[in-house]
Amino acid sequence: MTVPPVVLVPGMLCDAEVWADVRLPGPVVHAEITAPDLGGMAEQILSAVDGPFVLAGLSLGAIAGFEVARRAPDRLAGFCAVSTNAGAPTPEQLAAWAEFDRRTRAGGFGSVVAEQILPTMFADPNSVLRRRFLDMARRVGPETFRAQLAAQATRRDAHDAVAGLSCPVLVLCGERDALCPPGFHRAIAARAGRADVRVLPEAGHLLTVEAPRAAAAALHDWLCSTVSLVKES
């Protein structure tokens, strides 16, 4: 049986660079999420490849992946949710995203990224990796950022979508993720039928950048067992 490709989906204000240090076995495809709603993002992911695939999404990439799980669970040979939240947005989050959008429209994209988003990305607020995130955000740009903020506002609770999956699920998070703490991930795993949880010590939200070796090892081990499960099914 052909090994299914892994579709890597970045988080908000990230591009393929967020996965650059994570080496995986088998074919890999990078998907973009630029649509202004989660349904559109899900269709972008589904159109990245034909047939079954393993989805690995980070943060907003996993949130878009939950919508894929709702629309086309039969396409998923495996689902890895990284640094994410399956809950519906809170009123505080909706208000913050609206304010980010207002400031970005007024020309404050750089300050929003540097003052509001960057401090939540790494376990160490003074990490030398900050520049990599800022460079990604600059490449993504303000218009895509605004579309991603709009998509965030279309979120709904996704725990039922996870519960409906028959494929293996890996939930991967950083122990020091202030944005999406380990409890969020344990709640996701508790709803999945075939789930494994990995918490990486001393890692924050962008763990594929901050702890790439540990992230790659967790993904590699899980993918090997997932491919075996797919072949046997």
Image: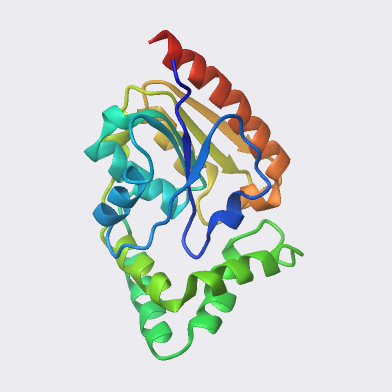
Q: Nearer the viewer, residue 44 or 39?
A: 44
Can you give x and y, in whole percent of width and height, for residue 33 in the image? 39, 57
Q: Residue at x 42, y 54 (%)?
A: 60
Q: How many numbered marks appear?
A: 0
Can you give x and y, in whole percent of width and height, for residue 230 in the image? 43, 17
Can you give x and y, in whole percent of width and height, for residue 159 in the image? 31, 38
On the question of residue 158 being in view, the answer is: no
Depicted 189 relative to depicted 81: above or below: above
Residue 217 vs residue 170: left or right? right
Residue 23 vs residue 1: left or right? right
User: Which quadrant, please, contains the N terminus?
Assistant: top left
User: Which quadrant, please, contains the C terminus?
Assistant: top left
Q: Residue at x 49, y 82 (%)?
A: 109
Residue 220 vs residue 213: left or right? left
On the question of residue 227 being in view, the answer is: yes
Depicted 167 relative to depicted 142: above or below: above
Depicted 78 relative to depicted 210: above or below: above
Q: Nearer the viewer, residue 87 or 223?
A: 223
| Residue farthest toward the bottom in the current orientation of the protein | 106
**Picture colour scheme:** rainbow
Q: Residue at x 31, y 31 (%)?
A: 75
| Residue farthest toward the top in the current orientation of the protein | 232
Residue 67 appears in which quarter of the rendering? top left
Depicted 82 relative to depicted 36: above or below: above
Residue 89 appears in which quarter of the rendering? bottom left
Residue 140 vs residue 198: left or right? left
Q: Nearer the viewer, residue 101 or 41?
A: 41
Can you give x and y, in whole percent of width and height, for residue 147 in the image? 34, 69
